[in-house]
Amino acid sequence: MTPTLSLAWKSVRNRKVTAILSILTVAISVILLLGVERIRTQAKSSFANTISGTDLIVGGRSGQVNLLLYSVFRIGNATNNIDWKSYQEFSQHRAVDWAIPISLGDSHKGFRVMGTNHSYFEHYRYGQKQNLAFQDGREFNTLFEAVIGSDVAQSLNYTIGSEMVIAHGISDVGFSRHDNTPFKVVGVLAPTGTPIDKTVHVSLEAIEAIHVGWESGANLGNNPSAEQLQKMDFQPKQITAMMIGLKSRIQTFALQRQINTYNQEPLSAILPGVALHELWGMMSVAEQALMAVSVFVVIAGLLGMLSSLLTSLQERRREMAILRAMGARPRHVFSLLILEASVLTFVGLIVGTLSLYALLAIASPFIQQQYGINLQIVALSHYEWMLLAAVQIAGTIIGFIPALRAYKQSLSDGMTIRV
């Protein structure tokens, strides 16, 4: 350690309270700056990883963001349904490798219920083309069996064998529940960090069965028992949307055009990646606003440190004069003040970065459970290192202001100050 740096460190230690406050100010600024950046990148990654390996999503005619929201994120409702015959026609198309039908509209205690078939567990991918895995149990095989996401199981304390009653529509109230057809939990999916964790999965046939005796969302009172329904055969009349995987991606645009111009009913086919990009673009204003707020907080933190240094400088004029009298040159005093600002900023960066990782370790499970954003504890990215370097440079530059004032103070001025 050089003599000037050693002297700067001793000077900081001599003013512990002021130094700690300055360090905390910088640390809080760094926590917010890196925290916003980490949440921004991880949220974007979580959005992109929600669905993988699906070439097209097909639904009733609507905007692609709306179709993506209700089919993948379980947000909102479909404008129109798809006729079952249309699903069969396109699922058997020569270019289609697999198709997953989904039916939405019901709920259970705040969680969306989705009707589907075994293709969903076989072909649906998320993240880096990861398969759905079971934490416990198996797929549904009979009419009134359900497979639940990990968040559903954790929030409602459901295990294999638990019974549940599905409600008609999004509001789970007494008069809308299908009380005569309780479902039995037979499987719990492993956590994915996607809306799958907050979904109850049942068969398409079960969706049809529970609505026997219902018309336009109203219970007409003629509801067969579960035992009676078990003996009946059900085939879906309509579905909400379908996900399609193609044999060759070269055929994507041709099939998309064919679906969008389908004569039998108005349909929309979207590319998930393009829709995700558009959705994230709609959120860019909030993203930029958060980043701007964090930058202003950093500026406020550095200005607070500057104020502290300038205030302490008035009390240290005799100290500077004594240093000059002992042979220190003006450039030594100048360097001392700059090094003090650099040391305070550097320590603040370390404290802030370590505090951020501690907060991530504590808050990550809660954020994943509540918002589906997987905040991974990984090393700082190149961009984050650049942000830290920018703060360090800014903190050093801030030190030039008190350093210049100290440089201009004369020896006689310092020696004649009253104390």
Image: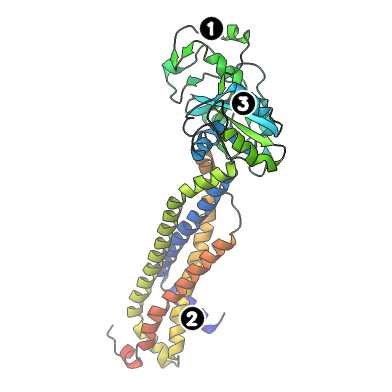
Residue 153 falls in which quadrant of the image?
Answer: top right
From the image, tell me which residue sits under label 1.
Answer: 224
- In screen coordinates, is 190 left or right of 164? right
Q: Position of residue 42 (x, y in %)?
A: 55, 50
Q: Earlier in the sequence, mark 3 or mark 1?
A: 3
Q: Is residue 196 visible?
A: no
The quadrant of the picture occupied by the C terminus is bottom left
Residue type at mark 3 is Tyr
**Residue found at x 50% / y 68%:** 390
Q: CA distance from mark 2 to mark 1?
A: 87 Å
Instruction: Say which of 283 and 321 sits in front.
Output: 283
Few, some or many C-alpha atoms within 10 Å of disc 3 (few <14, some 14-19, many ≥20)?
Answer: many
Q: Which mark is residue 7?
A: 2
Q: Position of residue 291 (x, y in %)?
A: 45, 57
Q: Is residue 2 visible?
A: yes
Callout in the foreground (2, 1): 1
The quadrant of the picture occupied by the N terminus is bottom right
- Whether residues under marks 2 and 1 lie with C-beta atoms below 8 angstroms apart, the answer is no
**Residue found at x 49% / y 70%:** 392
